[in-house]
Amino acid sequence: MSATTLPAPFAPTIFSPELAARFDKLVTLYPVRRSALIPMLLYAQDEIGYLSDPAIAEIAQRIGITELDVRNVLSYYSMLRTKPAGKFNVQVCTNISCMLRGGRELLEHCERRLGIGHKQVTPDGVFSLEEVECIGACSWAPAVQVNYDFHDNLTPEAMDAVLESYRAKANE
């Protein structure tokens, strides 16, 4: 499909009406429809929690590319998930700045505290854990991102408080 050929309106959709409308508008904002792929993937992941096979198929159809094209992008970006994550996805940075200030130890502490490893989910579905390369908070290392919230200058004790605050939110 060429960049100027628009597919017919997409229905039915697996996404909420609001997100489907957002997708319809998003593909018109770029000179090449494929440029909307990463924003669409992020929005879909935010709504569903991960990028399921039906989500991948619909996004590919909406843009006019193959599912393989979508999966190739998914395999490149570590922030995109094809498996469900916990309600709170804990990303511990272990890049050089964070590593030198205790990032590796912080990751190991989270593994012990949560009882899970990299890209695993707690049995209750509240937390998932990831080791990430960089979250852009080098000046405040070691840093952790939980969903879209940053936490910095962490110690194991401070990390425990962070985890407890999210545990309390999960029980609300």
Image (cartoon, rainbow, N blue to C red):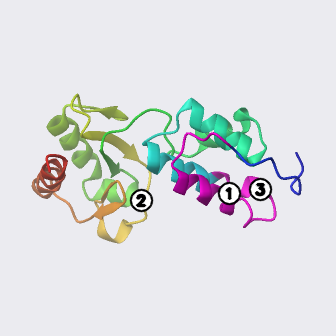
Dot 3: few (<14), some (14–19), or many (≥20) neighbours within 10 Å? many
Query: What kind of element bears circle 1?
Result: helix
Q: Which residue has dot 3 on it?
A: 33
Type of the residue with mark 2: Ile
Could you tell which of marks 3 and 2 lies nearer the N-terminus? 3
Say whether residue 35 is left or right of residue 114.
Answer: right
Q: Which residue has dot 1 on it?
A: 24
In the image, which is nearer the foreground, mark 2 or mark 1? Answer: 1
Say whether residue 166 is left or right of residue 66.
Answer: left
The tally of labels here is 3
Is-magenta flag for residue 15?
yes
Between 164 and 160, the one lying in front of the other is: 164
Query: What kind of element bears circle 2?
Result: loop
Say whether residue 146 is left or right of residue 15.
Answer: left
Type of the residue with mark 1: Asp
The percent position of residue 134, horizontal first and vertical second, equals: 43, 56
Between 135 and 31, the one lying in front of the other is: 31
Residue drawn 37% across and 38% down? 85
The percent position of residue 26, horizontal first and vertical second, equals: 66, 61
The percent position of residue 161, horizontal first and vertical second, equals: 11, 56
Gap between marks 2 and 1 measured at Cα:
30 Å
Q: Which residues are magenta?
A: 11-37
Query: What kind of element bears circle 3?
Result: helix
Query: Residue 142 sits in which quadrant?
Result: bottom left
Is disc 2 in contact with disc 1, using a CB cutoff of under 8 Å? no
Reply above or below: 154 against 126: below
Q: Which residue has dot 2 on it?
A: 135
